[in-house]
Image: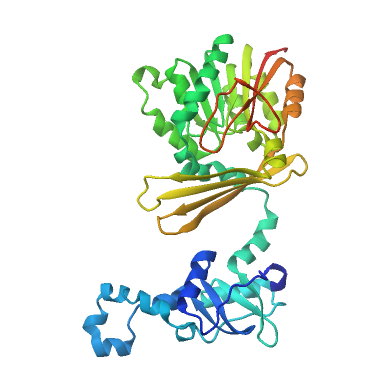
């Protein structure tokens, strides 16, 4: 594979007469560690973070002339305004390492390793810039196409460190718990399996109400946080809830017990794109005779057809000293082969500027009301009710009080019961 196959053709560059400030703005704004310096289209140098930082420190000549002043780190920091006003020509590396478009990508990677740099300008025979190649480009081209969505495995670990810590659980439980309790009373529920329990908030709250609850999640971080929150329970209710770091299939096989209610909250079912039908079947077989299954599923039809693929866009303040505010962006691609790709972007602000905190892609099962109802009927459920719910990324809604509307509801909430063996 050649550099031309993986390089970025849109290149941010600066002129030698530009102020260093412009290079800094590109470095910060693009999340990169350096930019090429061009006269016209010809590459004559590169300016990197290190080139800029080096200007803060005294040269040997400066030390000889004024060693006391220059050894003051506070005084060195005051150079920032002066450095930013310098022309790029004064600080750039004048012998840039470049590659040709037909260079093998591993040769380019080797050059970056030897030179300890992260990006290489790609130039033609006259030294004119054609593109830029980075270590990330090489990594993605070599590794990215060889793996499936392993990000699904750590997706919830990623969320547990960011998004889940900002969920208003008081608001969510205030709306969802009364409806769950009402359904549980109707079905004389005593034991509950909470599939994809996350940080355990539903499970813990149900334990407070006297239910025996097992929460299961494939994310080690989620289960660790759930057990931490469980510590706050009283001695009387502490033993009512148990958390397991397992895939649900494994748990159902290992425990081999029946539950009066099985919950799939927060789009848990969709996070099993390869086996969600099997998961419904396995869970159904672990349901007691008068048991009930409850699903909370993203209404993909509304997201795709009315909201133009955008699920949510939210700003959330934090109490973190370093991070003042998060911005969460969630959107979907169009479905392919009954799967749909979700992208979750987290931005963070220190109060002065924004930067990327991470992005995850998660491949999900693409379902709708008809598909879920048909699957449940096939599993022998004779009473299947669907409801709609509102969610804007921060504020929650009741579960079972509104009719489901394909172009209006944010959630598809399903209650399935009266299963024939």
In-front residue for pair 385/404 = 404
The residue lying at 63 percent from left, 71 percent from top is 133
Whether 255 is drawn above or below 349: the answer is above
Instruction: Measuring from the top left, give residue 198's x and y in whole percent.
Output: 51, 34
Is 77 displayed left or right of 103 in the figure?
A: left
Q: Which quadrant would residue 207 be assigned to in this image?
A: top left
The residue lying at 65 percent from left, 48 percent from top is 149
Whether 402 is drawn above or below 52: the answer is above
In-front residue for pair 203/353 = 353
Instruction: Measuring from the top left, give residue 336's x and y in whole percent.
Output: 76, 44
Q: Residue furthest left?
A: 68
| Color encoding of the figure | rainbow
Q: Is residue 240 visible?
A: no
Q: Quadrant of the N terminus?
A: bottom right
The residue lying at 65 percent from left, 31 percent from top is 409
Instruction: Measuring from the top left, give residue 284's x and y in whole percent.
Output: 67, 20
Instruction: Measuring from the top left, give residue 281's x and y in whole percent.
Output: 70, 24
Q: Quadrant of the C terminus?
A: top right
Q: Which quadrant would residue 390 be assigned to in this image?
A: top right
The residue lying at 42 percent from left, 79 percent from top is 85
Q: Is residue 364 visible?
A: yes
């Amino acid at each position: 594979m050649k550099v031309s196959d993986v390089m970025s053709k849109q290149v941010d560059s600066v002129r030698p007469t530009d102020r260093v400030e412009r290079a800094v703005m590109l470095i910060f704004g693009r999340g990169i560690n350096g930019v090429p310096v061009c006269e016209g289209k010809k590459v004559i140098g590169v300016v990197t973070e290190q080139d800029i930082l080096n200007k803060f420190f005294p040269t040997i000549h400066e030390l000889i002339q004024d060693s006391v002043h220059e050894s003051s780190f506070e005084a060195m920091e005051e150079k920032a305004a002066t450095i930013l006003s310098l022309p790029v020509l004064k600080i750039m590396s004048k012998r840039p390492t470049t590659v040709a478009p037909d260079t093998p990508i591993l040769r380019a990677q080797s050059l970056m390793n030897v030179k300890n740099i992260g990006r290489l300008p790609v130039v033609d025979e006259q030294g004119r810039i054609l593109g830029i190649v980075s270590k990330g480009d090489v990594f993605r081209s070599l590794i990215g196409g060889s793996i499936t969505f392993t990000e699904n495995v750590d997706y919830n670990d990623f969320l547990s460190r960011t998004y889940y810590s900002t969920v208003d659980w008081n608001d969510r439980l205030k709306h969802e718990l009364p409806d769950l309790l009402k359904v549980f009373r109707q079905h004389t529920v005593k034991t509950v399996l909470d599939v994809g329990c996350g940080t355990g908030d539903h499970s813990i709250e149900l334990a407070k109400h006297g239910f025996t609850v097992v929460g299961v999640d494939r994310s080690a971080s989620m289960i660790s946080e759930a057990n931490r929150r469980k510590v706050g329970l009283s001695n009387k209710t502490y033993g009512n809830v148990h958390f397991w770091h397992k895939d649900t299939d494994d748990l159902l096989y290992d425990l081999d017990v029946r539950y009066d209610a099985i919950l799939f909250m927060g789009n848990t079912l969709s996070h099993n794109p390869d086996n969600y039908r099997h998961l419904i079947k396995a869970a159904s077989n672990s349901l007691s005779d008068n048991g009930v299954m409850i699903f909370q599923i993203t209404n993909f039809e509304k997201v795709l057809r009315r909201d133009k693929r955008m699920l949510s866009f939210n700003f959330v303040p934090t109490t973190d000293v370093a991070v003042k505010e998060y911005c969460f962006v969630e959107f979907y691609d169009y479905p392919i082969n009954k799967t749909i790709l979700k992208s979750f972007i987290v931005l963070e602000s220190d109060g002065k500027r924004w930067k990327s905190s991470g992005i995850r892609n998660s491949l999900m099962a693409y379902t709708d009301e008809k598909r879920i109802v048909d699957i449940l009927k096939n599993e022998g459920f004779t009473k299947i009710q669907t409801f709609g719910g509102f969610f804007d990324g921060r504020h929650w809604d009741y579960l079972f009080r509104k009719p489901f509307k394909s172009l209006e509801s944010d959630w598809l909430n399903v209650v399935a019961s009266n299963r024939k063996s």
